[in-house]
Image (spheres, rainbow, N blue to C red):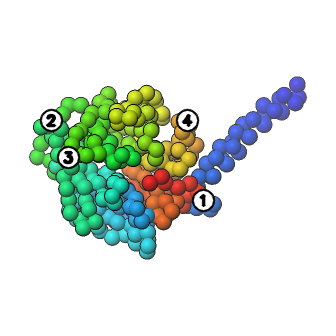
């Protein structure tokens, strides 16, 4: 009996050591969260360029900021920016933006020329594209929650449902892929294009889906009992959610790490830098980085 008792006493210690090992294996040895800059009003939408540069938005100030992988300096890239919110680079190296000023989806080329990809759905103004992910085919999944902005002239929703849409690779059709949400926000997909994660920040839940060959989504399953403003994935299939710092879940939906950030709200996250081994975190007025052992999947 004594051996059994000792075994059970040891289990919590073993479990604690296992969790600690699991958490620290994601973060580079001795790495700490580093403040890059705190000169903004509200940071959002980080996206990594093909060369490792990271672009993010200072949304209230209507500008896109660039962090350079070459010299690790930040500078204003585009101002005004259509009140850009979520950002993502397409397969041709263009920067896509959820341009919140007129509820549009923009494509910004390397010369900063803007093409409006979407500005309505069936003749009605979108609620406000917020976050987006591009699948391997070049199609765009994007969330469309309603956050009433002080700079809008309209006061009511033209589309009652807060949905998730898909813009086909030829950019000719917009398809509703999900609309059973309180307020969809963060969205990310796997590198092979078979799985999609969508956060319902209004219901404090995140769901996983399988992506069908026709770009529709199915097999909805609860992934985590928390919502997320923005999200990303690493090469191990772990999913990073934001809000109270950054919370990391393994592919089975088990929490394996929490990265505290000294801000009231953490809005978004992505991997960037030369080898995509730096985690970039946008939180309130600031941009932070953390060196990782895992890397991004762009």
Residue situated in front as seen by the camera: 259 or 275: 275
Does residue 145 appear in the picture of this structure? no
Residue visible at 16% across and 42% down? 120
Q: Which is more N-terminal, label 4 or label 2?
A: 2
Distance of label 3 from label 4 (alpha carbons): 35 Å
Residue drawn 29% across and 62% down? 64
Among numbered discs 3 and 1, the one appearing first in the sequence: 1
Mark 3 → mark 1, Cα distance in angstroms: 40 Å
Q: Around disc 4, counting alpha carbons within 10 Å, would you say few (fewer than 14), some (14 to 19), or many (20 or more)?
A: few
Q: Disc 2 versus disc 4: distance between alpha carbons?
A: 38 Å
- Seen at 28% across and 65% down, the residue is 110
Rendering coords of residue 163 (x, y %)? 28, 34
N-term-proximal mark, 1 vs 4 = 1
Left of 297 or right of it: where is 201? Answer: left
Residue placed under numbered mark 2 in the picture: 122
Q: Position of residue 223 (x, y in %)?
A: 48, 33
| Rendering coords of residue 7 (x, y %) | 81, 32
Residue behind mark 4? 252
- Circle 3 or circle 4, nearest the eye: 3
Residue 49 seen in render:
yes
Relative to residue 273, is residue 159 depicted above or below?
A: above
Residue 141 picture quarter:
top left
Q: Is disc 2 placed on a helix, strand or loop?
A: loop
Query: Which residue was labeled with disc 3?
Result: 118
Q: Is residue 292 placed above or below 135 in the rendered structure? A: below
* Residue found at x 25% / y 46%: 170
SS of the residue under disc 3? strand
In front of the other: 154 or 111: 111
Return the residue at label 1. Answer: 28
């Amino acid at each position: 009996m004594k051996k059994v008792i000792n075994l059970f006493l040891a289990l919590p210690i073993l479990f604690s050591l296992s969790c600690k090992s699991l958490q620290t294996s994601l973060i580079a040895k001795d790495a700490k969260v580093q403040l890059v800059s705190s000169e903004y009003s509200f940071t959002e939408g980080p996206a990594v360029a093909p060369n490792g540069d990271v672009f993010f938005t200072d949304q209230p100030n209507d500008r896109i900021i660039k962090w350079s992988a070459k010299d690790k300096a930040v500078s204003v890239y585009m101002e005004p920016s259509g009140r850009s919110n979520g950002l993502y680079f397409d397969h041709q190296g263009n920067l896509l933006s959820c341009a919140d000023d007129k509820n549009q989806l923009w494509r910004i080329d390397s010369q900063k020329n803007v093409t409006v990809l979407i500005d309505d759905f069936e003749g009605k103004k979108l609620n406000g594209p917020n976050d987006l992910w591009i699948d391997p085919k070049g199609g765009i999944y994007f969330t469309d929650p309603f956050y009433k902005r002080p700079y809008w002239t309209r006061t009511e929703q033209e589309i009652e449902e807060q949905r998730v849409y898909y813009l086909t690779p030829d950019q000719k059709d917009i398809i509703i892929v999900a609309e059973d949400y309180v307020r969809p926000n963060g969205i990310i997909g796997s590198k092979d294009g078979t799985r999609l994660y969508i956060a319902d920040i209004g219901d404090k839940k995140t769901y996983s889906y399988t992506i069908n060959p026709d770009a529709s989504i199915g097999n909805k399953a609860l992934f985590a009992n928390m919502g997320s403003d923005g999200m990303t994935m690493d090469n191990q299939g772990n999913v990073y959610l934001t809000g109270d710092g950054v919370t990391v879940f393994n592919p089975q939906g088990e929490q394996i790490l929490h990265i505290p950030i000294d801000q009231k709200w953490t809005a978004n996250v992505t991997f960037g830098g030369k080898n995509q081994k730096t985690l970039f975190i946008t939180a309130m007025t600031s941009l932070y980085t953390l060196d990782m052992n895992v890397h991004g999947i762009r």
